[in-house]
Amino acid sequence: MEDNNGSAANPPKLNPQTFFEKLLWAFRWVVILGVLANLLGGIAMIMLAVSDCYHALQEIFSYLTGNDTTSEPNHHMLTLLVEMVDRILMAGVLFIFAFGLYELFISKMDVNRQNGEGKILNINSIDELKSKLMNLIIMMLVVKLFSFLTNANINHMEDAILYSGAIALIALSSLLIHWAGHDKKNKH
């Protein structure tokens, strides 16, 4: 092939640095495996939560119809419902982590942004991803503590004080995270 001057055109030379950078950039697609694993894990958590809800409703129905007269379903049903909430929160963590990985490494998702939807998916940095995940993890800890307290036998005043202290620390950490997020919004 000849250019306008009649000389042969030289193909662009690919130096090692450019080659390595293109190769490195292509490897970002490996992250898609982590995205898919988190999405599948989130779906599994939702399915387990639906199963917990079904068993809780089955237990209530059995008690109300008189088929189960051995005990009141309150304690076991409450445990099932707390586990359901915990699993839904865990699914939320997995979904947000999957969306964040995708947006940080692969591409921004434009599907819901055209209509102004999908604000939870607006992840522009690792700090934003950590903040969203931290809020859900704190909620999971609150649910776990609640589940633990429903099963706990408080025999001494010290136990009650320790449990109250744990609740106060979780509330304080939640407040501090809220303030930190509020300060970041005011700076921008």
Image (cartoon, rainbow, N blue to C red):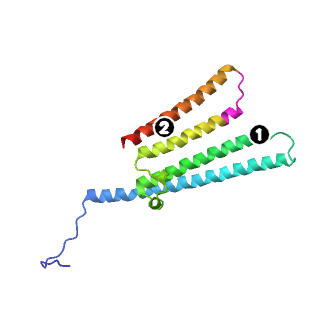
Which dot marks residue 74? 1
Disc 2 vs disc 1: which is toward the camera?
A: 2
Where is residue 138 drawn, in percent x and y? 55, 38
Where is residue 160 drawn, in percent x and y? 66, 24
Dot 1: what SS?
A: helix
**Residue occupied by mark 2:** 178
Dot 2: what SS?
A: helix
Q: Residue at x 45, y 46 (%)?
A: 129
Q: Amino acid at mark 2?
A: His
Query: 148 and 167: which one is in front?
Result: 167
Q: Residue at x 51, y 50 (%)?
A: 96
Q: Is residue 101 above or below residue 159?
A: below
Label 2 neighbour load within 10 Å: few <14, some 14-19, many 20+: few
Looking at the rendering, in which quadrant would you find the C terminus? Answer: top left
Per the rendered image, the range of residues in magenta is 147-155
Q: Is residue 58 above or below residue 23?
A: above
Which dot marks residue 145? none
Q: Is residue 109 above or below residue 78?
A: below
Query: 73 and 5: which one is in front?
Result: 73
